[in-house]
Amino acid sequence: MDKTVLITGATSGIGRATAILFAVKGYRLVLCGRREERLEALRSELGKKTEVHVLNFDVRDREAAFSAIASLPGPFSEIDVLINNAGNAHGLDPIESGDPDDWDAMIDINVKGLLYVSKAVVPRMIERRSGHIINIGSTAGKEVYPKGNVYCASKHAVDALTTGMRIDLNPYGIKVGAVNPGAVKTEFSNVRFKGDDARADSVYEGFDPLVAEDIAETLLFIVTRPAHVNIADLVITPTAQASATIFNREG
Ligand code: NDP
Ligand code: 8X3
């Protein structure tokens, strides 16, 4: 498979599951994240199946993002598919008691980080008149829920940016779309609740949440559509989830 896929946030959850599935399918991978040991473990595990290059940077650091992507050697630099996945929620508080450090983290990672990585990757896609960008949004980018305020705002921004990027990159034949998951059991809630794992687990109690592999399979479906087909916007939830706040939880 002569296609290079760059995945941000590949050290955990959705990004990691996508890296594993895409390695099995033979895609050349550029895997990004801050946790170096996890990147190295992925490189050694997935390197048995495909070519893997890892980039260790914080998406909030604009210069680090640009120089990491500029450093990509040979075919790793010809990115066919960019999956902008890195992101998290930080906290779940009403606006009046929210922590501005959490607000900064969510805007800086989920919105500005996505922009920096895209800014670094898009010029070569334009030169090649080819490319595919998939942003991982959220149901939180489609509706706002209590105490979701800034996280929801960051994912609404991803929703708007996906449309904006699709419009601006349309003349160059570049596909842009978003996958917007509902509840997926990953490290997401552990991060949101700052290591309170019991509270994190309670988010998924009483129903079958999505697992990261469900999103990985969805991404593989999107990436394998024919050249004339773009999946522009996709919402995927557990069957038990009817909206951001309505869950069918059994007794
Ligand atoms: P995880 O916490 O399991 O994974 C988050 C990933 O993002 C990690 O690989 C982490 O890597 C990376 N990341 C976080 N901050 C940074 C940073 N500053 N710089 C670089 N990488 C960073 O959560 P998920 O897999 O669930 O989340 C992936 C995406 O899916 C996010 O955008 C999230 O908002 C979205 N999403 C998740 C849902 C869910 O219910 N789980 C539902 C809807 C959307 P590292 O810490 O090594 O840097
Ligand atoms: C993650 C899902 O409902 O916690 O984006 O916002 S939710």
Image: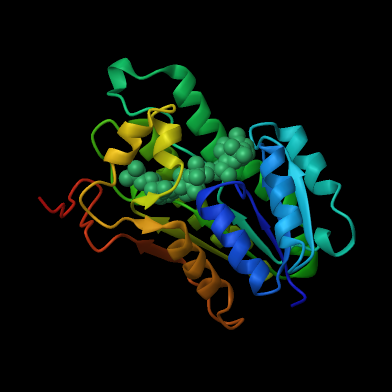
Which of these two is toward me, 42 or 238?
A: 42
Res 170 seen here: no
On screen, residue 176 above or below 61: below
Query: What is the x, y in percent for residue 209?
Result: 31, 55
- The quarter of the rendered structure image containing the N terminus is bottom right
Which of these two is toward me, 160 or 183?
A: 183
The reply, left or right, for residue 163 in relation to residue 128 is: left
Which of these two is toward me, 183 or 158?
A: 183
| Residue sitting farthest toward the left | 251
| Residue sitting farthest toward the right | 74
Figure label count = 0
The reply, left or right, for residue 22 in relation to residue 72 is: left
Residue, x 77% and y 62% (percent of image)?
Answer: 47
Residue, x 52% and y 28% (percent of image)?
Answer: 105
Query: What is the x, y in percent for residue 109?
Result: 56, 36
Query: Image quarter for residue 128?
Result: bottom right
On screen, residue 57 above or below 214: above
Query: What is the x, y in percent for residue 220?
Result: 55, 71
Residue, x 52% and y 72% (percent of image)?
Answer: 222
